[in-house]
Image (cartoon, rainbow, N blue to C red):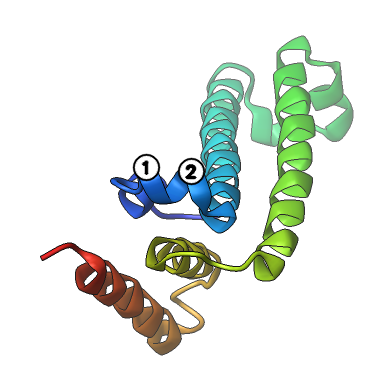
Amino acid sequence: MLFGASATPVLAGQASANATDPTIAACERWFAVEAERERLSAEWGRHESFLAREFNWFRLSEDQRRALPQARKLDGIAVELEALDRKSDALLKALPSTPAASVAAVVANLTIATRLLYPDGYEEVHGLMVRAVRDLKTLSRPT
């Protein structure tokens, strides 16, 4: 599960760069897929909570869970999440070969990297990357 904010702050105010920079366009697609994945994950959690509350979901056997019509919604969400995982992976694989044409594109790439690098396991590296994103945004602002 990924964490973090939406892509809006990362790419905000970059309309002219977005139109000409294929890296920004690719990053925007990745952020959109991740936002949908986060939305579906939250929906999964809400529905699973409903099932736990109404049907004692966590005490049911696998056969009992499969027999419960209300559980089919989780199956549908799982299928959608798997499709989004494949799409996200494909977009992510394409990003390194897409050259950046702006500082905004570098910021977008680094922002994706910070979302994929868990801070718990790589606290110092994550902190450096977050700092680099902040610094690049500051340095690239018109004066």
Q: Is residue 111 left or right of residue 63?
A: left
Observer-nearest of 59 and 29: 29
Quadrant assignment, res 138: bottom left
Observer-nearest of 78 and 101: 101
Q: Is residue 26 above or below residue 94?
A: above
Q: Is residue 141 left or right of residue 3?
A: left
Instruction: Identify which amino acid the numbered label 1 is placed on.
Output: Ala
For label 2, the SS is helix
Q: Residue at x 52, y 54 (%)?
A: 21
Give x and y (percent) for residue 132: 34, 79
Residue bearing mark 2: 19
Q: Is residue 106 above or below residue 53?
A: below
Residue furthest right in the image: 63
Q: Is residue 135 above or below residue 94?
A: below
Q: Residue at x 53, y 72 (%)?
A: 117
Q: CA distance from mark 2 to mark 1?
A: 6 Å
Observer-nearest of 56 and 34: 34
Residue bearing mark 1: 15
